Image: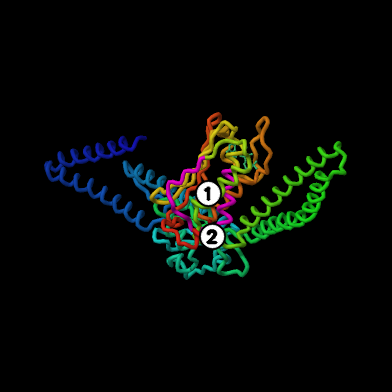
């Protein structure tokens, strides 16, 4: 029966009794008043029962009621039961999440808006040395590494991860990443990369050793081939063969040199010791060398719009700039033009090496700085595929960026963008003398 129908029948029955007693005692207003009071008292009684149930009663035991109250009790009972089920599911889910994050081999820390620790998993205890008592403390006070403090302060979390040694475990290398989520919350994830770093070192050491070992036999081979291709006694039929062999050994030598410098840069074993570098003088030198490389090559124009220098490693900058200029000369036809432009951008300085060569298709651009990546074109020039990888590493070591823009059929522009902190506008005399 609908709750209102049962309530209505109750009201009608009371009115019927009221009318009967009013007739019997001839006291209509008193009987009506009594009826209203008893009706109100019934509702108050059920309200009180509802209150008692909500305040302390068991959600699974629905109180007895009749009329509209039976329906109200039932609906509240159903709501409470559903909430209870949902709460149980949520608790289970949270528990599962907690066990999963606790089992994660990576240290996970939830940071609040002021970098304070809200929660962390077991691995964070082992890798970062955090304890229960550290909850609420600022993470920067516990992980005292300038690199890490800087990373937190900058709030530029799109930057790749940063590496720090573990404060809790000796010889353990950590890679830290902060992921923002929700309103002002962040997740700090620290991964143990000791094994990975070790493997990387083994790989670079291997390449460096092999390259180094190959150098001596190649030099000997090249020496003999040079002698043989110049010797008068060599039969003319063999001369061509020897020259080809000599060309190939030269190529192998440049490959090995490239690999060696790349592994040296990648290993980061030698920290960059910045010294003033006279960039205009360096560029003049590179231009001369590039001009000598191909006397019938494209015209090279050097535009020095500033006399500013850089704080950096001269041999590295020389190899990076020279790779870009040599590439431009190599890939641009003789009737084309190469423009090397050095300019002050107010907030930093920039070197543009622009050419009117064949250009590079868009799909190759993101992979161009990978080692050994070469664009296969018909009648393409020979090369090692290491030049741009070296240039990119040198730029990264100088906190600079290598930008590549190219339009097929029109030409390419390789730019090295240096930050303001690297630029020196008044070069010390010593730097000018060294470059000259
Ligand atoms: P490589 O020794 O082959 O020149 P790099 O790493 O210097 O190696 O260059 C990688 C590839 O990028 C080259 O093989 C070439 O296809 C392309 N490239 C580099 N510079 C230019 C340029 N100025 N114009 C057109 N293509 C270029």
Q: Residue at x 70, y 48 (%)?
A: 255
Task: Give above or below for 427 relative to 79.
Answer: below
Residue at (56%, 38%) from the top-left corner? 365
Q: Does the magenta portion include 308?
A: yes
Could you say which is closer to the camera, residue 352 or residue 74? 352
Q: Position of residue 52 (x, y in %)?
A: 33, 56
Residue at the spot of label 2 = 434
Q: CA distance from mark 1 to mark 2?
A: 13 Å
421 versus 403 height, above or below:
below
Q: Counting other residues with Cα less than 10 Å from the Cα at mark 2, is it few (<14), some (14-19), or many (20 or more)?
A: few
Which label was assigned to residue 283? 1
Q: Quadrant of residue 164?
A: bottom right
Q: How many marks?
A: 2
What is the secondary structure assignment of the residue under circle 1? helix
Q: Nearer the viewer, residue 414 or 206?
A: 414
Ligand 1 lies in quarter: top right
User: Which residue range is magenta in the image?
Assistant: 301-325
For this view, does 248 lie left or right of residue 141?
A: right
Farthest front residue?
Answer: 232
Query: In screen coordinates, is 149 left or right of 38?
Result: right
First of labels 1, 2 by sequence position:
1
């Amino acid at each position: 029966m609908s709750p209102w129908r049962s309530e209505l029948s109750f009201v009608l029955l009371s009115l019927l009794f009221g009318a009967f007693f009013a007739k019997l005692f001839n006291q209509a207003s008193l009987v009506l008043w009594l009826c209203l009071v008893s009706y109100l008292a019934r509702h108050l009684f059920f309200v009180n029962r509802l209150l008692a149930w909500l305040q302390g009663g068991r959600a699974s035991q629905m109180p007895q009621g009749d009329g509209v109250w039976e329906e109200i009790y039932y609906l509240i009972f159903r709501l409470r039961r559903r909430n209870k089920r949902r709460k149980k599911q949520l608790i289970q889910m949270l528990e599962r999440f907690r066990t999963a994050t606790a089992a994660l081999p990576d240290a996970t820390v939830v940071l609040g808006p002021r970098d304070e620790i809200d929660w962390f998993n077991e691995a964070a205890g082992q890798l970062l040395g955090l304890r229960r008592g550290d909850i609420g403390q600022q993470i920067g006070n516990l992980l005292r590494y300038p690199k890490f403090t800087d990373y937190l302060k900058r709030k530029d979390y799109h930057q790749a991860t940063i590496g720090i040694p573990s404060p809790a475990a000796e010889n353990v290398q950590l890679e830290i990443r902060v992921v923002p989520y929700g309103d002002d919350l962040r997740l700090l994830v620290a991964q143990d990369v000791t094994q990975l770093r070790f493997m990387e070192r083994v790989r670079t050491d291997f390449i460096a050793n092999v390259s180094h070992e190959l150098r001596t036999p190649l030099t000997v081979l090249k020496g003999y081939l040079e002698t043989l291709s110049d010797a008068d006694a060599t039969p003319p039929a063999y001369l061509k063969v020897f020259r080809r062999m000599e060309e190939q050994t030269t190529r192998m030598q440049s490959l090995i040199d490239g690999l060696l410098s790349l592994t040296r840069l990648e290993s980061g074993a030698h920290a960059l010791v910045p010294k003033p570098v006279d960039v205009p003088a360096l560029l003049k030198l590179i231009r001369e060398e590039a001009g000598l490389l191909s006397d019938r090559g494209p015209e090279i124009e050097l535009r020095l719009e500033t006399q500013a220098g850089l704080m950096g490693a001269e041999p590295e900058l020389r190899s990076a700039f020279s790779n870009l200029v040599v590439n431009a000369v190599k890939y641009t036809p003789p009737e084309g033009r190469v423009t090397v432009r050095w300019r002050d951008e107010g907030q930093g300085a920039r070197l543009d090496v622009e050419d009117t060569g064949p250009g590079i298709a868009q799909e190759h651009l993101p992979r161009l700085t990978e080692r050994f990546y070469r664009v296969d074109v018909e009648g393409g020039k020979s090369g090692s595929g290491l030049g741009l990888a070296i240039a990119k590493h040198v730029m990264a070591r100088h906190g600079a960026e290598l930008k590549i823009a190219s339009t097929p059929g029109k030409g390419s522009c390789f730019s090295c963008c240096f930050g303001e902190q690297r630029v020196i506008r008044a070069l010390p005399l010593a730097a000018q003398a060294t470059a000259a």
